[in-house]
């Protein structure tokens, strides 16, 4: 496992860290002094990100974890504490979408997979973060949830993704409320059209609310990572509750 040897003041767990927003956010956080525990299902990708961080003088370790697995999430946090002594930041980034379908054509297995990854996974990680952060010394920490513009304005033919991202907002609000007594801050970054595998079809066109298919602009995941790093940089007395980072010309304001 790739890592450097010197201790770090702050420790971050980033889920879905092998590619896209998770990868760029981990690199940005490491640049800001976080020791990063990179979680995800594809270990080879995680190792490559960890090696890149270490080569740049940062600290990182790859940890294979499926966020839908309760025991695996517990082991992820236990490993982070055993290695680095604490957890200061959780970026709940891992998520999936599903093929574009009408509601009446969505199968239960497909629905359940999206719910498990996009909602149950963040809940399991948040629960474990609470357990660690309230008992460490000094107590407290920060949780940043990857929401979506679809948490507010749904896309057509994406019922499972839309519903889970709306639910993530409820998780964010609940964690923000309950975290106060422990010095745990929780915020949400709502991202519109970052250029990742989930948006690879944007250039060809996405169905709009009026039924037409039109291409949509995207933004570099590095721009999202800068926003995540800013949220993580604040003292625990301050919190970005919700932040929207989006392609300027994407159909969001006035969508539908």
Image (cartoon, rainbow, N blue to C red):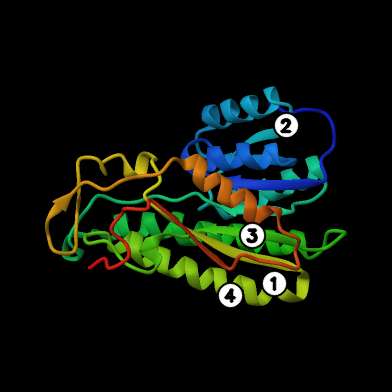
144 displayed left or right of 222 = right
Front tag of 3 and 2:
2
Q: Residue at x 87, y 59 (%)?
A: 137
**Residue 71 seen from this side:** no
Q: Callout 2: helix, strand or loop?
A: loop
Position of residue 44 measured from the top left corner of the image (x, y, whole percent)? 53, 27
Which numbered dot is residue 179? 1
Give the distance between the C-alpha atoms of the residues marked 2 and 1, in whole angstroms: 29 Å
Between disc 2 and disc 1, whose residue precedes? 2
Measured from the top left, where is residue 104 in percent x and y? 17, 65
Residue placed under numbered mark 4 in the picture: 174
Residue furthest top in the image? 55
Q: Secondary structure at mark 4?
A: helix
Among the two numbered marks 4 and 1 on one chain, the one whose residue lies closer to the N terminus = 4
Crowding at mark 4 (Cα within 10 Å: few <14, some 14-19, many 20+): few
Query: How far, Cα to Cα, is label 4 from label 1?
Result: 8 Å
| Residue holding disc 2 | 58
Contact? badges 2 and 1 (CB < 8 Å): no
Report x, y in % for residue 62.
63, 34
Q: Looking at the picture, tell me which residue is in the foreground, 110 or 197.
A: 197
* In front: label 2 or label 1: 2
Image quadrant in which you'd find residue 182: bottom right
Quadrant (top left, top right, bottom left, bottom right) of the N terminus: top right
* Disc 3 to disc 2, C-alpha distance: 21 Å
Residue furthest to the front = 248
């Amino acid at each position: 496992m790739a890592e450097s040897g010197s201790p770090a003041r702050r420790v971050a767990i980033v889920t879905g860290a092998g590619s896209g927003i998770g990868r760029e956010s981990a690199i940005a956080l490491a640049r800001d002094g976080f020791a990063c525990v990179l979680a995800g299902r594809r270990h080879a990708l995680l190792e490559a990100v960890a090696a890149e961080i270490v080569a740049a003088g940062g600290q990182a370790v790859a940890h294979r974890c499926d966020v839908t697995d309760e025991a695996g999430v517990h082991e992820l946090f236990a490993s982070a504490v055993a290695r680095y002594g604490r957890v200061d930041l959780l970026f709940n980034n891992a998520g999936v979408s599903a093929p574009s379908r009408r509601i009446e054509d969505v199968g239960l297995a497909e629905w359940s997979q999206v719910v498990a990854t996009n909602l149950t996974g963040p809940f399991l990680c948040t629960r474990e973060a609470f357990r660690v952060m309230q008992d460490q010394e000094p107590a407290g920490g920060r949780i940043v949830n990857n929401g979506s513009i679809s948490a507010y304005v749904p896309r057509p033919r994406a019922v499972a993704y839309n519903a889970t991202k709306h639910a993530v907002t409820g998780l964010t609000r609940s964690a923000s409320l309950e975290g106060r007594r422990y010095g745990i801050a929780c915020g949400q970054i709502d991202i519109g059209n970052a250029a990742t595998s989930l948006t690879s079809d944007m250039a060809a066109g996405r169905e709009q609310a009026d039924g037409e298919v039109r291409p949509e602009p995207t933004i570099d995941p590095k721009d999202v990572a800068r926003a995540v790093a800013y949220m993580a940089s604040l003292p625990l007395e301050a919190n970005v509750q919700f932040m929207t980072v989006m392609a300027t010309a994407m159909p969001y304001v006035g969508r539908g």
